[in-house]
Each structure stands twice: as structure tokens, then as C-alpha cells.
Image: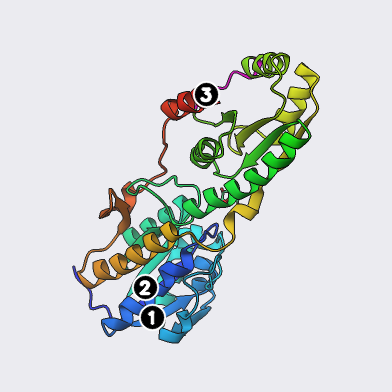
Amino acid sequence: MAHKINKIGVLTSGGDGPGMNAAVRSIVRYSLHYGLEVAGIMRGYQGLLEEDIIPLNHRSVSNIINKGGTILKTARSKDFSSDEGKAKAAEVMRKHKIDGLVVIGGDGSYKGANRFYELHGIPTIGLPGTIDNDLTGTDQTIGCSTAINTALESIDKIRDTAQSMERIFVIEVMGNKSGYIAMQVALAAGAEDVIIPERTFDYAAMHQELMEGNRKGKISYIIVVAEGAATAPVVAENITRFTGFETRYVVLGHVQRGGTPSGQDRLLSTRLGAAAVDLLLNGIYGKAVGILEDEINVIDLKDAVRRSHGDMEDHYELLKILT
Ligand code: F6P
């Protein structure tokens, strides 16, 4: 049943990603254009439970389209995870006269949003906000493109020293259980190898390749590791143990979550924010919005589960051909 939507609440939840601010800006200004009020819910679901809610106007979202992080702050809320927590959150929504909710977050945030919608029927829409690109229904998630660019910038710098000092470098990138970032980054950086959770990796073959390469005069190597597959210190230590070559490692970590959002992330966020408001205004709830092949794509929140990109064997083969 369509509810009358006068006020939309927006929150960011889970790990932040560059582009979330651009989504918030789009939601706020698009809503205002249609005469709606917008409530900014701080610190994700936790802020909702604690009634940490602020009105957002046109000026509240000035100059944020190019800013990383999220002005609404974000958190992972244990309290909201129970059904009691969700009942309290629904009460807060009613008290603050918030008729619809846009949740920008990843897999865990989507699950929470779906259960909240199922239990309380509150018009809810999810936007894919995670650097990991591990959600169904969208080609890309908000923050992934920037995270890839950030990792590349670092790896380009590491390559300078790797070549100068003729060293092997193992570089660990984020992605949670997904190797998507690692594979994209490895291909775009021209890395010599990549280790991802989705494919079985032959460590002995890599050690062998490093030794053969060394015999032929190839001394600097870049090996990208997805955090979900292995840790860089262990991979580096094993390389030294089995080959005798001095190996350095770098864990890029949270640096990948910050910085100026790429054009791609800003565009994605801007389009998705408006699409979320359109859905609420059209009485379409309990959905996750994405972009597939440049078209807005809407699926049920309950189906917007974690997505695997498979073993990306074609990418791996290409990488090895090109090294
Ligand atoms: O899901 C986004 C992400 O950055 C993952 O890539 C990473 O595994 C995780 O969050 C890190 O979480 P935290 O910021 O809590 O350490």
C-alpha cells in the first residue's frame, strides 16, 4: 500500500565509501525539489535508535559532492540487529514523522533494511554503498571506483621503489570477502600476480616463477593480495622462506576508503540518490537500487544479497599473458 511520503530519512551505514556524500546531496536536493522534508540520521541505525536526527536543507549539502567519507557519519549498530531494536527504530521514525527511509550501505546494512521493512512496513530503499562491489543488482557500488584509483596511485608509487631497489612487493588491498578490488587493481597496475579468495592460488608455482624470473634477470615484482585471501606479511614471509629473496609488503588498508570520490562514483551516487526518492514517491518500497548497463535497476531488498564475481579466471589469464 502506498504511504503518503512527506519526510524522508537518510542514513549511511557500515564502512563508509567515497561518493556517499554525493548520494546524500542528491537525495536531499531531489526531495526538496518535490516538496519533501529530509531528515539526516547520524551514525547509521545507531543514530536512529538514539534519535540523533537533524533536518537537512539545500545548504546542508553544499560543497559535499567532492568530499570523501560521509557527513552523516556511519556505524555498525549491534542494537539495531535485534527485532526489538528494529521495533524501537520504527517508533523513533513515527515520533519524528519520518515516512520513508533511504539506507546507503553494504550487505549487512541491506539485510537490516530488509528486515526492518518486512517487520514494520516502513517504506525503505537501499543504495549500494561499499567499496567492495559485492552486491547484486548493480554493476558497481558507491566507493569502489575511487578505492581502485586510490590503490593504483599507491601501487604506482611502490613500483618506483620496487624497480629502483629491485625488490618484490606484496600489496594487500581491501574488499572484505571479495577479490574484485584486488583483481581490478592488479590488472590496471600491471601487477605480476594477484591472489584472490575466489580462485585457488598455486603458491609453489609463484615461488618457482619468481626464481625463474630472477635467473632471467627479472628482479622486481608486484603481487596484489585481496585481504579475504591472505595477509601480505604471511605471503611475503613465505616468498622469502621459499625463494631466499628479500620481500617487502604494504597493507594499504583504510587509505582506500578515503579521498575525493571519482567522477564515476559521483555520477553513480547522484543518479541512485534521485532514483531512491522517485521510488518512495511512487509507492515502491523494500527495494535496492543499482545501475546495470547504464540503466537504473531495481530489485527486492531481500534479493540484494552478497554478490560474487566468480574466479575472474579470464582476468587472471589476461594478467599473466601481459606480465
Ligand atoms: O566493507 C568495506 C570494508 O572497507 C572492507 O573492504 C573491509 O574488510 C572492512 O570494511 C573494514 O572494516 P573496518 O573499517 O570496520 O575495519
The three-letter amino acid code for the residue at tag 2 is: Ile
The three-letter amino acid code for the residue at tag 3 is: Lys
Q: Secondary structure at mark 1?
A: strand
Label 1: how many residues lie within 10 Å, few (<14), some (14-19) or many (20+)?
A: many
**Residue 78 on the magenta span:** no
Label 2: how many residues lie within 10 Å, few (<14), some (14-19) or many (20+)?
A: many
Label 1 beta carbon within 8 A of ligand 1 = no
**Looking at the image, which is closer to me, 226 or 7?**
226
Q: Residue at x 54, y 60 (%)?
A: 16
Q: Are marks 1 and 2 in contact (CB under 8 Å)?
A: yes
> What whole-number distance in Å separates the C-alpha atoms at marks 1 and 3?
50 Å
In what quadrant of the picture does the C terminus appear? Answer: top right
- Give coordinates of residue 121: x percent, y percent: 30, 65
Q: Is residue 147 above or below residue 191?
A: below
Report which residue position mark 3 lands on. Answer: 320
Report which residue position mark 1 lands on. Answer: 38
What segment carries the magenta color? 199-204
Q: Nearer the viewer, mark 1 or mark 2?
A: 2
The three-letter amino acid code for the residue at tag 1 is: Val
**Looking at the image, which is closer to me, 20 or 46?**
20
Which picture quadrant has residue 310? Answer: top left
Label 2 beta carbon within 8 A of ligand 1 = no
**Left or right side of 114 for 168:** right
**Left or right side of 183 for 306:** left
Which is nearer the N-term, disc 3 or disc 2? 2
Report which residue position mark 2 lands on. Answer: 27
Which is nearer the N-term, disc 1 or disc 3? 1
Q: Secondary structure at mark 2?
A: helix
